[in-house]
Amino acid sequence: MGLAIQGGRFIDPANNVDGKRDIFISDDGFVVAVGKKPDNFEITRTIDAVGKVVCPGLVDLRARLREPGLEYKATIESEARAAVSAGITTLCCPPDTDPVIDTPAMAQMIQHRAWRFELAFIHPLGALTRGLEGEALTDMEALAEAGCVGFTNALRPITNTLVMRRAMEYATSFDLTVFLHSDDPWLHGDGCVHEGEVGTRLGLPGIPEAAETVGVARDLALIEQTGVQAHFCQLSSSRALDMVAEAQNRGLPVTADVTAHHLHLTEHDIGFFNTQCHVLPPLRSSRDREALRQALRSGVVSAVCSDHQPHEPDAKLAPFSDSAPGISGLETLLPLVLKLVDEKVLSLSEAIASITCRPADILGVDSGHLDIDATADICIFDPDSWWSLSEDKIVSRGLNTPFLGWEFCGRVTHTLVGGQVVFDLENGGKA
């Protein structure tokens, strides 16, 4: 007995499948067949997917859920609910919570909270150093056993190069992935925008491209020295992409991602101090944006993430340099990636791969594909449905986004996690 999804265009990039297929899901939540209905399979519920795309549930490499520590901004429950409304079934949570995810107990608490709500799966990243202070290393082996899928110091730079080397050596010995936010803190300084014409016109302190490239250069040297599996998070500049591409060509074990908003916005979108465009790394030049798109097309960049950072309204009401950086991005991840398809940057299969199997491979988790016997985490969306983003349509507690008023084509109609429908647009979002 189980569920049948019938008549849809089934796209599973991990298995190079793109065509009209029916999917049959057992009542315990696993894919039992694709195409022909198995003998003795009794259909107890049917989802009509005619005219829609059926694909693996989306995997978001980076989303801050604000719990624990900043529950006045958002909670695990509120953001997991927002995630499934956007077709996202797997989330990766950075360790810069309060307290920091630097002990097995904290890692387990995050996962147990997520399991309670039976919405999206949440995989924590462990801290590289205790308290993210950049000094003493955490017990990465114990954190990995507690469920951490990788390790990072988030946006807190490890300025002591020897500490970073030791952290990479530790991670290498246990075959763990290090997630890097490469940035030189001294060049970054108190900057809040790209060091360019817009920042100069507005009189705002700039962050030069060199802040990123110097950080990437140091980290690449250490990666070559230690052999660690490394992932560069949210690269934003053309030069940094060239450096990563050259390292990949030399066989270094490195991957990279970009944020969805960096693929569409530039420094010019700041306009006259639009704090919704205050992000880190900053929105850069049009040339950098085009380089990001080309790197995604060529495979230098493997994945697109939301870098979801929900804020309360007051956080964006301060002067630009004092406002909180970050965008509430869960619900625009799929629409912004589909926009790249409309603009002929990617094929639909490539676009879906960048938010399903490729990020899953980076995390080393068993998701982002729909093999037989795989857990039925599924996103169904209507690729021809036009809609406009407005505050009343945002499920997340964070309404901070520069995309309010944008029209998008492609809307999630159903999300399944473990074979259970957790979002149904036709039923007002209820399962």
Image: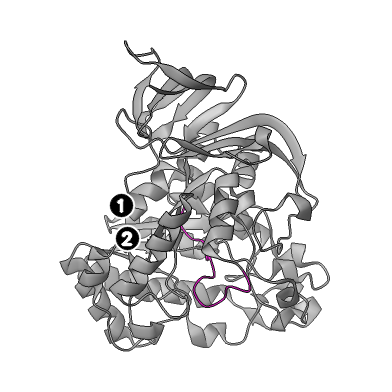
Front residue of 313/43: it is 43
Look at label 1 and name its amino acid: Gly
Mark 1 crowdedness (10 Å alpha carbons): few <14, some 14-19, many ≥20: few
Image coordinates of residue 129 in percent, x first then y, are 33, 81
The residue at which mark 1 appears reads as 364
Mark 2 crowdedness (10 Å alpha carbons): few <14, some 14-19, many ≥20: many
Residues in magenta, as a range: 60-73
Q: Left of 204 or right of it: where is 47?
A: left
Q: Main secondary structure of the magenta part?
A: loop
C-alpha span from label 1 to label 2 = 7 Å
Image coordinates of residue 235 in percent, x first then y, are 50, 63
Quadrant of the frame with the C terminus? top right
Quadrant of the frame with the N terminus? top left
Whether 67 is among the magenta residues is yes
Considering only vertical position in the picture, is 163 above or below 328? below
Q: Quadrant of residue 247?
A: bottom left
The numbered mark, 1 or 2, whose residue comes first in the sequence reads 2
Classify mark 1: helix, strand or loop: loop
Q: Is residue 184 visible?
A: yes
The residue at which mark 2 appears reads as 149
Look at label 2 and name its amino acid: Val
At horizontal 42% and vertical 35% (from top left) the residue drawn is 419
Marks 1/2 in contact by CB < 8 Å: the verdict is: yes
Front residue of 327/168: it is 327
Render colour scheme: one colour
> What label does residue 318 carry, if any?
none
At horizontal 77% and vertical 48% (from top left) the residue drawn is 406
Classify mark 2: helix, strand or loop: loop
Image coordinates of residue 429 in percent, x first then y, are 64, 41
Q: Quadrant of residue 34?
A: top left
Q: Residue furthest right?
A: 272
At horizontal 38% and vertical 12% (from top left) the residue drawn is 36
